[in-house]
Amino acid sequence: MKIQVLGSGCANCKRLYELTTEIVRESRLEASVDYITDVSKIIELGIMQSPVLTVNGKPVMTGFVPNKEKIKDLIFKELN
């Protein structure tokens, strides 16, 4: 599983990356979490808001930082 957090490098983007990394570690998922600050990558996805959370290349959340449980739900939903 490949998880990406895309953003401009702002505090919200960094927070989403930190929370996502914690979830992957705590859940012992076999996944890599990448933090991408290249705005052109967000535009390539056709998205104009950040931060963006993608799972296996699919955007699952954009424009805000949800709580840890919501992030976990989004990730695990993509596992099924």
Image (cartoon, helix red, strand yellow):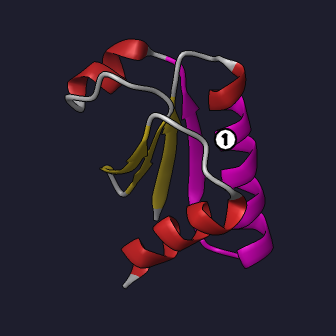
- Mark 1: few/some/many CA within 10 Å (<14, 14-19, 20+): many
Q: Name above or below for residue 64 compared with residue 29.
A: above
Figure quadrant of the C terminus: bottom left
The secondary structure type at the circle numbered 1 is helix
**Residue 59 belongs to the span the image colors magenta:** no
| Residue 52, image quadrant | top left
User: Where does the magenta region start and end?
Assistant: 14-37
Q: Residue at x 27, y 29 (%)?
A: 47
Instruction: Please identify the quarter of the rendering in which residue 31 is found.
Output: bottom right
| Residue type, mark 1 in image | Tyr
| Frontmost residue, 39 versus 63 | 63
Q: Residue at x 36, y 57 (%)?
A: 56
- Taking depth in this image into account, of 39 and 67 the one nearest to the observer is 67
The image quarter containing residue 49 is top left
In the depicted structure, whether residue 66 falls above or below residue 78:
above
Image: 63 above or below 29: above
Image coordinates of residue 46 in percent, x first then y, are: 20, 28
Residue at the spot 53% in from the left edge and 38% down from the top edge:
64
* Residue 13 at x, y percent in the picture: 62, 29
Total of numbered circles in the picture?
1
Q: Residue furthest bottom?
A: 80
Q: Position of residue 74 (x, y in %)?
A: 47, 66
The x, y position of residue 35, in whole percent, is 59, 33
Q: At x 58% / y 64%, what residue is drawn?
A: 70
The residue labelled by disc 1 is 17
